[in-house]
Amino acid sequence: MLSAGGHAQVPREAFAQPLPALASDAQLEQFFKGRGLFRQAWVVAPSADESAQGLGPLYNRITCIACHPRNGRGQAPSEPEAPMRSMLVRLSVPGKDAHGGVLPHPLYGDQLNENGIPGVPGEGRAHLDWQYSEVTLGDGQRVELREPRIRFSELAYGTLDGVQTSARVGSAVFGLGLLEAVDAQTLQALAAAPKADGVAGRVNWVWSVERQRLEVGRFGLKANQPDLAQQIASALHGDLGITTALYPQQNCTPAQTECQQAERGPQPELDAQRLSALHFYLAHLAAPPRRQRDAAPIKQGEQLFSELGCGQCHVPRLTTGQHPNYPALSQQAIEPYTDLLLHDMGAGLADHRPDYQASGREWRTAPLWGLGLGEVITPGAGYLHDGRARTVEEAILWHDGEARPARKRFSALPAAQRELLMGFLRSL
């Protein structure tokens, strides 16, 4: 058991619980089958364990959970030569693909895969060199901020001239089915609703591989995936080199000869039945409930959250629509603290890497549910897309662009009120 900042103790597996609505033995069996796949270590084909073969030829990690420890957020390395254990670097070149998405680098594809199976060189190494600065709050308190600079070494397939990069830590994976069940009309209504302080928010229209059309994006740090199935299949393909019906080709570029010639097992490497089980598991992972919501200090912090304007993007409550496959996710009142929309977060957080309609300065609003437990279940996990923020306070102080007025109000608060706000956020 773990203690959550003075709250009641919580289990280490608090981010791995099924939705209470999963009551039948068949549903729970499917859930735990998917959990086994999420935690499974993949191996190189051919293998005596045919159910686990298919790793690579290029890959970042050998399990899904490596980048999502205990189903929570990943962590950026604190030292330049330390390996990236739960993060990766996206790559692209200027321009768009045939559907308006990113244009992969011709030699390295759309992310750097540091590892290769025997006989296939890994693509290289990525390093984060940290630059530090300091901001002073209204009451004189000083807060150190850090910002990464990406550096590459041991590049195996040529230079990365003209490359666009974006460092990304793994995101929490609970509550995804409920977010998938929020219908597109709700997101479009949120985008159209009037907001104060110059806050806008818009949907990202992205390509559905399965349905061959543009749809509202909701998953990924720039909302560049339309649904959970594609998000899962894309991660399997990019991070592990596992093929599925959605992504049947090996993750090699034409320039990577050894990768192209690597031995392959039966295709696809993750069949439809097992992909369905993995989807079922991730769709039915429960978001942890709020704690101490009726305590007076928590209520005061919640009021500050609203007064500062944070709730314009981190929308507290949504109602799901009708999920096409999973009734347990339909017509549910949820508290994710997100609008799933793109917002301009300013130059400081810009990665200068557009993705469909998302500019280099725009990011999808991160859900805040589970925020407080994350400090305990995955200590050291980073905040923001690249894990630069070591604390929630640092993350707030990086907010700019549409969030600048809210950040300035936060910075002007006295320490006691800032702590009330933090206490509320820890209760989520």
Image (cartoon, helix red, strand yellow):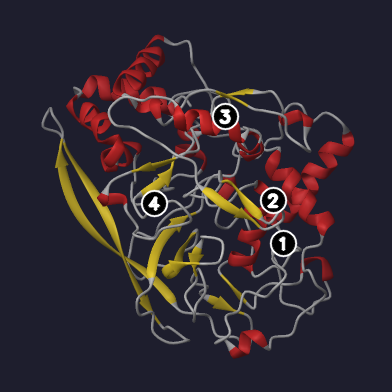
SS at circle 2: helix
Residue 39, image quadrant? bottom right
Q: Is residue 205 left or right of residue 13?
A: left
Residue that carries the numbered disc 1 in the rendered image: 246
Residue type highlighted by circle 3? Thr
Q: For mark 4, give the secondary structure.
A: loop
Examine the rendering and report whether any part of residue 353 can be seen. yes
User: Marks 3/4: CA distance?
Assistant: 30 Å
Q: CA distance from mark 3 to mark 2?
A: 20 Å
Q: Is residue 278 left or right of residue 139?
A: right
**Amino acid at the residue labelled 1:** Leu
Q: Marks 1/4: CA distance?
A: 29 Å
Residue found at x 59% / y 39%: 12
- Residue depicted at x 35% and y 13%: 300
Q: Which residue is mark 2?
A: 229
Nearer to the camera, 202 or 425? 202
**Relative image position of residue 178 (x, y in whole percent):** 64, 33
Between disc 3 and disc 4, the foreground one is: 3
Q: Secondary structure at mark 1?
A: loop
Mark pair 1, 3: CA separation: 27 Å
What's under tag 2, amino acid-wise?
Answer: Ala
Q: Which residue is mark 4?
A: 387
Residue at which label 3 appears: 186
In the image, 335 versus 126, the foreground residue is 335
- Residue 127 screen position, x and y as percent: 36, 69
Of 215 and 330, nearer the camera is 215
Labels 1 & 4 near each other (Cβ < 8 A): no
Dividing the image into 4 quarters, which one contains the N terminus? top right
Q: Tell whether 218 sits left or right of 381.
A: right
Q: Earlier in the sequence, mark 2 or mark 1?
A: 2
Looking at marks 1 and 4 on the same chain, the residue that comes earlier in the sequence is marked by 1
